[in-house]
Amino acid sequence: MNSKKFLFIDESGDAGFYGGRKKLLVGTDGFQPYLIIGMIETENRKFLRKTVIDFIDNVKADNLYNTIPSVAANKRWYVHAREDHPEIRAKFFELLRSTDGYKAHIAIAKKDLTVFNRKHNNSPTEFYFDVLHHLLNGRLANSDCKYMLYLSQRGNNSLHNFQKAVDKALALSENASGKSIQYSLEVVPSVEMPELSVIDYLIWAVQRKLLKGESRYFDALKDKYATILNLYEEQ
């Protein structure tokens, strides 16, 4: 085994089409029109982790930022794009565009009820992990490398379903190469995995462009995106 690659996976939006009592949410306030799943890939996890931890420590030590309510009120505060103060958000974007050693892959699924019913059997779990499979497909192809995969712990992100999505992606690579791919899987809380803040921000920039038409965040990090997939558009 020559090397390790670390893959950190997070999402924005959700896989749901229905609320309580099977009420259809499409077209209502609060409905999430996209499920976006993203992943950063790095061989230098220690550097990336230290970069984010140092950023957090610096914010907490700086009285220009540590009195911001979202920081001051949470002893376990971590970097999270949707909830961060705009000044912290801008500061972290500046850090990300000046930091090397990682690249991102993004899968965007515009939610379509017909596709959901026909392709995913009306199951949010099937929908979510199908998008995840597409994100991983072709990314786990080097038999000389061990892949360490970390999925953010949210909703129904169980290790069992994560394993199925990875196995499906691996089957194509292993059939093509005739060699087995080495890997490990974990479902982890974002607060305990600083590296997930990086992909959280990269996904947020994509979502901001899609929903608000504001592309400056995405444009600032454009060279960090290796792959952006638009799924189900012609199905």
Image (cartoon, rainbow, N blue to C red):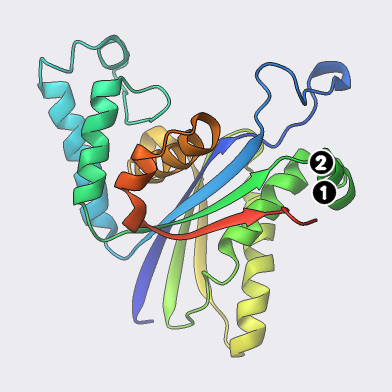
Q: Quadrant of the N terminus?
A: bottom left
Please state the horizontal and vertical placement of residue 212, each as a whole percent of the image: 50, 29
Tell which residue pokes out farthest to the front in this image: 213
Q: Residues within 10 Å of mark 2 (few under 14, many from 20)?
A: some
Q: Which residue is mark 2?
A: 123
The answer to whether residue 18 of the structure is visible from this angle is yes
Q: What element does badge 1 sit on?
A: loop
Q: Position of residue 160 (x, y in %)?
A: 67, 51
Residue found 82% across the figure and 48% down from its top: 120
Q: Is residue 163 visible?
A: no
Residue at 20% across / 42% down in the picture? 95
Horizontally, residue 234 falls left or right of residue 33, namely right
Question: Is there CB contact under 8 Å for labels 1 and 2?
Answer: yes
Report the residue at 19% width, 50% height from top: 98
Label 1 vs label 2: CA separation?
6 Å
Q: Which mark is residue 120?
A: 1
